[in-house]
Image: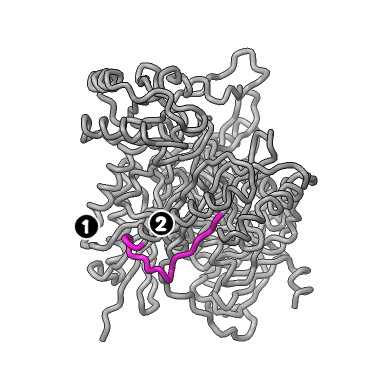
């Protein structure tokens, strides 16, 4: 008998660390443990131990994929490593000048953005290239030795090197980098030509500095995580989810630390695409709501939206990233009263420790989770990680804002939930209605521990097509980590006019980049038959300041000759006009290479008669539903719902990792994949 092999995916969030194990035989094991913000690798180890307790044989684990918030939290809080910057003489203050944009144009006392590298840690080297990449002055050895001496005195934790025009010719950067790595063998050195071979001096330099400042933290964490897995008995490779929706081996993910800033949310979007394919629902809006924040992403025609530039904490980061809109509204978002006496919710969070007051871990501030407990939509014993919900503690917390506002505790809870819901509705509108899209054509996919709590409310507020509650909503992001596979991104700024004479150069770049990427994936253990390529180009009309990314079908001569026509069409779609007589400039060429990972398919279950099994109703509870008043709602055990079952709200559907709230007038159907499909009754009747 063949021993089943296991894969494990682990998503470390702000409140919980989620883990899903899948065997080659089709078995699935789930775990949800409390996160350990002081050292997330402990939460990783606890999650693995919980899976082992459910029968997962750790020596038989063949792969572990991990989504982490280490880079995210460090960047958001400014808790970065102490990095130094080495740059071309005369360009020491690029990080200070930035792009000369004022965040608060009309403020008399504008807030100055924090600097990534303090001025005393920025060092200049005598060397120079011109804008065509030609050498004007070679690297001056004396200048280089002087900088090395000053760096020894400064003793930074990391060093960033960003020389002028090095995206065109990196010979000077490689020379400086080699000298620095020889002089400081224990200090990570990041070259801009290795992490962002693109133009515009501030974004390129900022990206290099962020990567350098993150590397000490990320590399140390990945070392601890790998050690924790090894100590648990897992000897398999560790993959880390990147912001681009694909993974990278931990052994080289640390060197590209800036690519992990959206590691956690990207796993949920990868799972969203797989869900779209399994249900044949190409237009989806995700609502990934955890304890601290909510991430919203829109899939149109089954395509994940990407952006090549991130704005994070006033800094510009050049890295392909899943286009996610984030708000500070999670289950642990704290409700408070401002100086004007108005009730606010978020963005401050109770986090994992102490957590919402209802957890009984010492928290006293009211949160969205506490509001749900007061209203009855969350009841005792319904959370993972051994948490027992205490309604008295939740009521005491909510009274801290309800009392001063002259409200009862329940009125205060309703107000907290209403404000939190308004934040979520605004976020969904931001990625749909405000982009000219009809929300009625999209299905909502709420996941994360707190997402399904708000499924029925958001569905009704926005008149969406339907809501789809995944099988494991609280573990959805973790389960999605293995879907996307490994991913490599390469880019090169060219700044040339599109024309036949440039086709050979562009074709050669794509071909060489594809070979390099395929070789790297082969070393990572991905076979050539599972490698896919996606080629794009950033284009603009001559004289424009910004570009549009245009997808290509390949890099043959015919595809490259079609670039201007594709750009004209993309420009017309985006802006409503185009000019076919205007020359098109190719700014940057990009290649994304994906190596697929084999994963067992979700089983489809035959659909029985459409009814709610009596044994699935485990209790009844009086709850106060916003807009519906007090109702007696059945408590439904989701694990006892068969495919094909159908029933009307109100209902509270509970499972290990999440709770789903269904409003009166809504219909729930269990799909053949065991996902829940929630619609308004009238629409459900019309679709039969």
> Callout 2: helix, strand or loop?
helix
Q: CA distance from mark 2 to mark 1?
A: 28 Å
**Residue 656 visible in rendering:** no
Badge 2 crowding class, 10 Å Cα cut-off, few under 14, some 14 to 19, many 20 or more, is many
Image x and y of residue 675, in percent: 56, 70
Residue 639 vs 447, above or below: the answer is below
Q: Is residue 528 magenta?
A: yes
Q: Is residue 280 magenta?
A: no
Q: Quadrant of the N terminus?
A: bottom left
Image x and y of residue 575, in percent: 76, 44
Q: Is residue 464 left or right of residue 8?
A: right
Marks 2, 1: nearer the viewer: 2
User: In the orientation shown, which residue stands out farthest toward the top?
Assistant: 108
Q: Quadrant of the C terminus?
A: bottom right
Determine which quarter of the picture holds residue 554. bottom right
**Residue 570 visible in rendering:** yes
Q: Is residue 275 left or right of residue 568?
A: left
The stretch of residues the image draws in magenta is: 522-535
Q: Is residue 55 left or right of residue 411?
A: left
Residue 538 vs 3, above or below: the answer is above
Q: Residue at x 76, y 55 (%)?
A: 438
> Callout 1: helix, strand or loop?
helix
Q: Is residue 144 left or right of residue 204?
A: left
Q: In the depicted view, which residue is nearer to us: 592 or 461?
A: 592
Q: In the depicted view, which residue is nearer to us: 318 or 260?
A: 318
Badge 1 crowding class, 10 Å Cα cut-off, few under 14, some 14 to 19, many 20 or more, is some
Nearest to N terminus: mark 2 or mark 1 = 1
Query: Pointer 2: what residue?
Result: 517
Q: Residue at x 41, y 45 (%)?
A: 69
Query: Pointer 1: what residue?
Result: 230
């Amino acid at each position: 008998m063949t021993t089943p092999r296991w894969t494990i995916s682990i998503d470390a969030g702000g409140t919980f660390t989620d883990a899903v194990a899948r065997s080659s035989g089709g078995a699935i094991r789930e775990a949800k443990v409390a996160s350990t913000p002081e050292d997330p690798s402990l939460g990783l180890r606890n999650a693995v131990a919980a899976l082992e307790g459910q029968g997962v044989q750790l020596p038989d684990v063949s792969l572990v994929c991990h989504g982490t918030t280490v880079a995210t939290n460090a960047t958001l809080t400014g808790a970065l490593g102490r990095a130094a910057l080495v740059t071309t003489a005369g360009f020491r203050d690029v990080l200070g000048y930035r792009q000369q944009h004022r965040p608060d144009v009309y403020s008399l006392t504008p807030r100055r953005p924090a600097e990534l590298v303090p001025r005393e840690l920025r060092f200049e080297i005598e060397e120079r290239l011109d804008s065509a990449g030609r050498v004007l002055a070679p690297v001056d050895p004396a200048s280089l030795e002087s900088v090395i001496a000053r760096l020894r005195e400064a003793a930074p934790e990391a060093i960033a090197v960003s020389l002028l025009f090095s995206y065109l010719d990196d010979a000077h950067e490689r020379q400086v980098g080699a000298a620095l790595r020889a002089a400081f063998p224990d200090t990570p050195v990041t070259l801009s030509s290795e992490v962002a071979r693109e133009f515009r001096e501030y974004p390129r330099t900022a990206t290099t500095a962020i990567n350098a400042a993150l590397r000490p933290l990320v590399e140390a964490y990945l070392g601890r995580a790998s050690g924790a897995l090894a100590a648990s008995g897992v000897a398999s490779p560790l993959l880390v989810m990147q912001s681009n929706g694909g993974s990278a081996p931990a052994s080289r993910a640390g060197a590209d630390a800036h690519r992990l800033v959206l590691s956690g949310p990207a796993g949920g979007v990868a799972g969203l695409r797989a869900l779209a394919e399994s249900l044949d629902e190409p237009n989806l809006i995700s609502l990934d709501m955890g304890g601290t924040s909510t991430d919203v992403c829109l899939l149109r025609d089954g395509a994940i939206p990407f952006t090549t530039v991130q704005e994070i904490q006033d800094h510009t980061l050049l890295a392909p990233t899943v286009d996610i809109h984030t708000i500070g509204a999670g289950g642990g978002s704290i409700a408070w009263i401002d100086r004007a006496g108005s009730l606010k919710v978020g963005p401050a969070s109770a986090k994992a420790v102490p957590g919402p007051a209802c957890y009984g871990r010492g928290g006293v501030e009211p949160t969205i989770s506490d509001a749900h407990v007061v209203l009855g939509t969350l009841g005792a014993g319904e959370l993972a990680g051994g948490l027992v919900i205490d309604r008295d503690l939740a009521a005491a917390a909510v009274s801290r804002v309800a009392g001063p506002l002259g409200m009862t505790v329940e009125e205060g809870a309703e107000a907290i939930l209403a404000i939190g819901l308004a934040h979520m509705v605004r976020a969904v509108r931001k990625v749909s209605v405000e982009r000219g899209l009809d929300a009625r054509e999209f299905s909502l996919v709420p996941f994360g521990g707190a997402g399904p709590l708000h499924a029925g409310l958001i569905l009704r507020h926005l008149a969406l097509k339907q809501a789809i509650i995944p099988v494991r909503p609280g573990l959805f992001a973790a389960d999605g980590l293995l879907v996307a596979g490994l991913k490599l991104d390469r880019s090169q700024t060219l700044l040339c006019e599109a024309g036949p004479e440039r086709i050979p150069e562009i074709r050669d770049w794509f071909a060489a980049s594809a070979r390099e990427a395929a070789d790297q994936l082969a070393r990572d253990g991905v076979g050539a038959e599972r490698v896919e390529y996606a080629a794009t180009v950033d284009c603009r009309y001559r004289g424009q300041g910004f570009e549009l990314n245009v997808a290509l079908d390949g890099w043959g001569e015919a595809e490259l000759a079609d670039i201007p026509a594709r750009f004209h069409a993309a420009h017309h779609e985006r802006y409503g006009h185009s000019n076919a007589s205007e020359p098109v400039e190719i700014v940057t060429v990009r290649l994304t290479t994906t190596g697929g990972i084999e994963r067992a398919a979700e089983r489809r279950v035959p659909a029985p008669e459409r009814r709610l099994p009596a044994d699935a109703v485990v209790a009844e509870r009086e709850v106060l539903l916003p807009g519906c008043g007090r109702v007696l709602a059945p408590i439904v055990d989701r694990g006892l719902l068969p495919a094909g079952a159908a029933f009307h709200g109100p209902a509270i559907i509970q499972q290990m990792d999440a709770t789903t709230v269904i409003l009166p007038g809504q219909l729930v159907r269990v799909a053949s994949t065991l996902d829940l499909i929630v619609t308004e009754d009238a629409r459900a009747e019309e679709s039969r």
